[in-house]
C-alpha cells in the first residue's frame, strides 16, 4: 500500500511542487520500506523510533487506518507508534482498510488501488 501511494503521489504531483515536496517513507518492516524506496520515496526509515521521530516532523501522514491503532497490522504497530501518529500535528490521511480485526462501518468495499487513488487525491489537494 505504501509503495502504491508513493508511486501515485510521485506520478501525479504538479511539476511546480515536485521540488518542494519530500516523501519520507516509514515502514513497519524492511520489506515495506524497501518497496516505498523503489516506488520513489525521497528518504526512508524503518521501525518504531523512525515512526516516532518522523511523525513529530511531518506535515501529512498517510497510511492504513491501523497506523493509529496499537497492535494492528498483525502486531507491527506499537503503542508508541500509534500514539506518536495520533498526537502529531500533521494532517492524517487514513485509508479505510477492513483487515486485521478493524472494521470501518459505513465504508464501501473497494479495491486497494481505488482507496489509494482517493487518498493520493486528498493529499495532493492538501499540498
Image: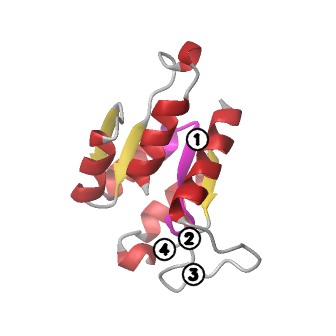
Q: Mark 2 highlights which residue?
A: 97
In 3D space, how far apart are the residues under numbered discs 4 and 2 (Cα atoms)? 15 Å
Spot occupied by residue 63 in the image (x, y as percentages of width and height): 51, 56
Q: Mark 3 highlights which residue?
A: 102
* CB contact under 8 Å: marks 3 and 2: yes
> Residue 70, which numbered label?
4
In 3D space, how far apart are the residues under numbered discs 1 and 4 (Cα atoms)? 20 Å
Q: Is residue 77 above or below residue 102?
A: above
Q: Which stretch is magenta?
A: 55-67
Q: Residues within 10 Å of mark 1 (few under 14, many from 20)?
A: some
Q: Is residue 78 above or below residue 32?
A: below
User: From the viewer's perspective, is 100 left or right of 29?
Assistant: right
Residue 119 in view here? yes
Q: Earlier in the sequence, mark 1 or mark 4?
A: 1
Residue 101 versus residue 90: which sits nearer the camera?
101
Badge nearest the viewer, 1 or 2: 2
Local secondary structure at mark 4: loop
Asked if residue 62 lies in the magenta stretch, the reply is yes
Spot occupied by residue 67 in the image (x, y as percentages of width and height): 50, 64
Local secondary structure at mark 2: loop
Q: Earlier in the sequence, mark 1 or mark 2?
A: 1
Residue at 45 percent of width and 70 percent of height: 79
In 3D space, how far apart are the residues under numbered discs 1 and 2 (Cα atoms)? 19 Å
Spot occupied by residue 123 in the image (x, y as percentages of width and height): 63, 40
Q: Mark 1 highlights which residue?
A: 60
In 3D space, how far apart are the residues under numbered discs 3 and 2 (Cα atoms)? 8 Å
Local secondary structure at mark 1: strand
In 3D space, how far apart are the residues under numbered discs 3 and 1 (Cα atoms)? 23 Å
* CB contact under 8 Å: marks 4 and 2: no
Amino acid at each position: 500500500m505504501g509503495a502504491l501511494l508513493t508511486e501515485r503521489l510521485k506520478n501525479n504531483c504538479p511539476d511546480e511542487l515536485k521540488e518542494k515536496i519530500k516523501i519520507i517513507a516509514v515502514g513497519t518492516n524492511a520489506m515495506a520500506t524497501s518497496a516505498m524506496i523503489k516506488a520513489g520515496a525521497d528518504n526512508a526509515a524503518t521501525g518504531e523510533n523512525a515512526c516516532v521521530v518522523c511523525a513529530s516532523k511531518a506535515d501529512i501522514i498517510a497510511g492504513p487506518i491501523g497506523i493509529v491503532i496499537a497492535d494492528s497490522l498483525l502486531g507491527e504497530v506499537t503503542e508508541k507508534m500509534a500514539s506518536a501518529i495520533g498526537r502529531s500535528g500533521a494532517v492524517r490521511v487514513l485509508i479505510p482498510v477492513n483487515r486485521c480485526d478493524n472494521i470501518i462501518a459505513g465504508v464501501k468495499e473497494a479495491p486497494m488501488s481505488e482507496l489509494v487513488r482517493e487518498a493520493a487525491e486528498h493529499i495532493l489537494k492538501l499540498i
